[in-house]
Image (cartoon, grey):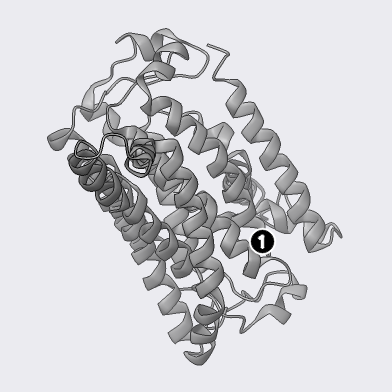
Amino acid sequence: MIYYIFYEWLFKRLSGQQPESVFFKALNVFQYVTFRTAYATITALLISLIFGGRVIRALRELNVGQQIREEGPQAHMAKRGTPTMGGVLIIGSVLISTLLWAKLSSIYVWITMGATTLFALIGFLDDYAKVTKRQSLGLTGKQKLLAQFLIALGIWATLYFFTDYSWNLSIPFFKLTATSGVTYIGPWLYLPFILIVLIGSSNAVNLTDGLDGLAISVTFVAMVALTAFTYVSGDERWARLLLLTFQKDVGELTVFCGAMVGASLGFLWYNAPPADVFMGDVGSLAIGGAFGTIGILTKQELILVFVGGVFVMEAISVMLQVSFFKLTKRHTGTGRRLFKMTPLHHHFEMQGWKESKVVFRFLILAILFALLSLSTLKLR
C-alpha cells in the first residue's frame, strides 16, 4: 500500500511536474525492496510491542489459558493458565506490515500470506479445542495432517496453474542443479516434495514451542538467514552471481521475511522467560507453514534443513523416540526410550538443565546453523 502511494502514485505521476524537487526525488527510495524490508521489520516490531499488552489482557479476560500435559516436566505445571494463542499477535503484525510495505502485484506474496493464514487457522482451531476441553489435546493428529495436506495441495495447484514456477530441484553445493535442468523432476514428482517440506516445517516449529522464548528466538535467527536467501534469490544479478535459481517477483517475499523478523522480536519481548504469553499452535503452525512456503517459493527447500537446524533436531528427536520405542516393544515386549523425554529440549530439562540454559544454548545452535546455511551461498 505504501509502495503504491509514495512510488507509483506520488513519484511516478508528480516527479515529472517538479523534476528539481528534492522531496519527489527522495520518494524514489520506495521502489527498493531493501528499504521496504527494513521498514516492514520496524513496523511489525512496533505493532507487536504496542498491541502486545492489550492482546495479553484480552486473552486473560477470555480465560484463554495454557493447558500443560501431565506427563511433562513438573516445573511446567506453574505455567498452567498463562495466556496462550499469542500467535495472533505475531501473524497479525506480519500480515499488516506486509500489506503496508510489499508490492502486492507479486503472486508469491499472496501465496505466502494465504498459506500463513491457513496454517494459523489450523492452529487456532487446535488451541480453541484445548481451551474449551481444558486439556492439552486439541485436534487429532489425523485432522491436522489432513488440513496441512490440503493447504500444501493448494499451494502446488496455485504454482502449477498461475505461475511459471521452476520444477527443478535445487541442491546446495551443486551449482548445475540451479543453472540447468539436470534435476528437473516435473510438477507431479514435486508435489510429494512440497507436502513433505510444508508438513515437516510446520510441525517441527510446533514441536520446538515448549519453553519460554525458545521457538520465537530460534524463529528470529532462522528468519534473518532466510531473509538473506530470499533477497539474493529474488534479485537476478545476485542469483546469477551466486548460482541460485531465479524466480521473477519472488524478491518481494523479502518484505514478508523482514516483517516476520520484526514480529518475532516484538513477541519475544512478552515471551521471554518467565513468559507473559505463549504463541500456541496458532503461532507455531503458522510460522512453520510460512517457513516452508518461503523455502519452496525461493527454491531453497533443502537449505531449510540448515537454516532451521534446531527445528530439525527437535522433530528428529521425536521421530527417533517413537520409532525406537515401537521397535523395542515389538521385539522385547517392553518399549525403551532413547531420550528421557521428547522433544529434545525436554530431555535436557530432565537432565537437570534450567529452562533458561536450554533456551540460550539452543539459540547459540540456531545462530551456528544460520551461519552454516549462509556459508553455502559461496560453496557451490
Q: For this view, does 240 lie left or right of residue 157?
A: right
Q: Tally the marks.
A: 1
Query: Extreme left residue here?
Result: 161
Crowding around mark 1 (Cα neighbors within 10 Å: few <14, some 14 to 19, many 20+) is many
Q: Quadrant of residue 376?
A: top right
Of 122 and 83, the residue lying toward us: 83
- The amino acid pointed to by label 1 is Gly
Q: Which residue is mark 1?
A: 213
Of 179 and 57, the residue lying toward us: 57
Query: Extreme right residue here?
Result: 352
Q: For this view, does 145 lie left or right of residue 221?
A: left
Q: Quadrant of the N terminus?
A: bottom left
Give me the residue at 44% from left, 69% from top: 88
Horizontal and vertical percent position of residue 325: 63, 51
Q: Establish if 136 lies above or below 14.
A: below
Of 163 and 105, the residue lying toward us: 105
Query: Is disc 1 placed on a helix, strand or loop?
Result: loop
- Residue 192 in view of the camera: yes
- Residue 340 in view of the camera: no
Q: For this view, does 99 lie left or right of residue 36?
A: left
Give me the residue at 84% from left, 58% from top: 353
Give me the residue at 73% from left, 81% from top: 78
Horizontal and vertical percent position of residue 333: 64, 54
Q: Establish if 77 lies above or below 340.
A: below
Q: Quadrant of residue 298?
A: top left
Q: For this view, does 296 lie left or right of residue 335?
A: left
Horizontal and vertical percent position of residue 372: 64, 27
Horizontal and vertical percent position of residue 82: 62, 81
